[in-house]
Amino acid sequence: MPVFESVFESAAEQPERPALRPVALTAAVPEDGQAATGRGLVPVAPALREVLPDGGLRRGTAVSVAGGDAGLLLALAAGVRETEGGWAAAIGLPDLGLAAAEGYGLDLRRLLVADDPGSHWPEVVSVLAGAVELIMLRPDGPVPPKLATRLAAVLRRSGCVLLVAGPWPGAVLRLGVRSGRWFGLGDGYGQLAGRQVEVVAEGRGSAVRGRTARLWLPDEHGAVRPVHQHPVREQPQPVAGPVEPAAPLVAAVV
């Protein structure tokens, strides 16, 4: 594998590598690497454009999602469906909710998953960067700066965007959820209907000053939108607000 050999030192014996699994088998992995040929931006949901200095995710860069907020991670990744290739990968995220990913807009037919790559996650990233346009990653521990520099070179060559759930040395952009609250529950009754958050973005260059935005992440319809934008139906009640007694409902949170 030329990509692997050009980035990482080979060893005499390699332990068994983790298997990749496509979420759906109705589409095939692109063989010609078209997903990595484009340059420019990977689009994001309109509500997130105002918080990103370029209005999208710059190809060939690493972006850190502080705290590994799953909702923010999926919302940022969902725009990959609008690109020519539309392929994405999730590495080291065994608890990733596929129903939630699809709800945010990811195409599960074009999502590759390596649930538990262990210490092999750098190899998996380096190989998949040439085949997909966006990778969601949770490393198995702190990332040495030297390794981050090596992978940064892989990203620049391939044009792939790396979304990291947690800190990443040299990330061009860092995003996080500074505050948030859920709506829809009260006194043990009801059903989660949405979450309001304040998203903060800061980084280097044009992003050094930082930007913030109040968003529904998600709203009652599973979409990402600004808080000031009115929903189709009446806004749900906040968790702390009074709720009329009713039969208890069980809600699954992904």
Image: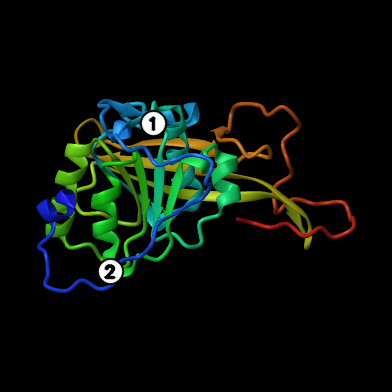
For this view, does 221 lie left or right of residue 109? Answer: right
- Viewer-closest of 179 and 71: 71
Q: What residue lies at 24% left-to-right and 35% top-to-bottom?
A: 159
Q: Counting residues from the N terminus, which is met first, the one under dot 1 or under dot 2?
A: 1
Badge 1 density bin: few <14, some 14–19, many ≥20, Cα 10 Å: many
Residue 8 vertical placement versus 76 (above, below): below
Q: Amino acid at mark 2?
A: Ser
Find the distance from the CA under tag 1 to the CA under tag 2. Answer: 28 Å
- Label count reads 2
Q: Secondary structure at mark 1?
A: loop
Q: Position of residue 67 (x, y in %)?
A: 40, 57
Q: What residue do we see at 67% from left, 37% from top?
A: 221
In the rendered image, residue 220, in percent from the top left (x then y), is placed at 68, 40
The residue labelled by disc 2 is 119
Q: Nearer the viewer, mark 1 or mark 2?
A: 1
Which kind of residue does numbered mark 1 sit on? Answer: Gly
Label 2 crowd (10 A; few <14 / some 14-19 / many >=20): some
Residue 18 screen position, x and y as percent: 35, 65
Specify the label residue 37 is tagged with: none
- Between 185 and 6, the residue placed more toward the observer is 6
Residue designated by label 1: 85
**Do the CB atoms of the residues marked 1 and 2 lie less than 8 Å apart?**
no
Dot 2 falls on a residue whose secondary structure is helix
Q: Is residue 234 left or right of residue 79?
A: right
Who's the residue at 39% across and 31% down the image? Answer: 85
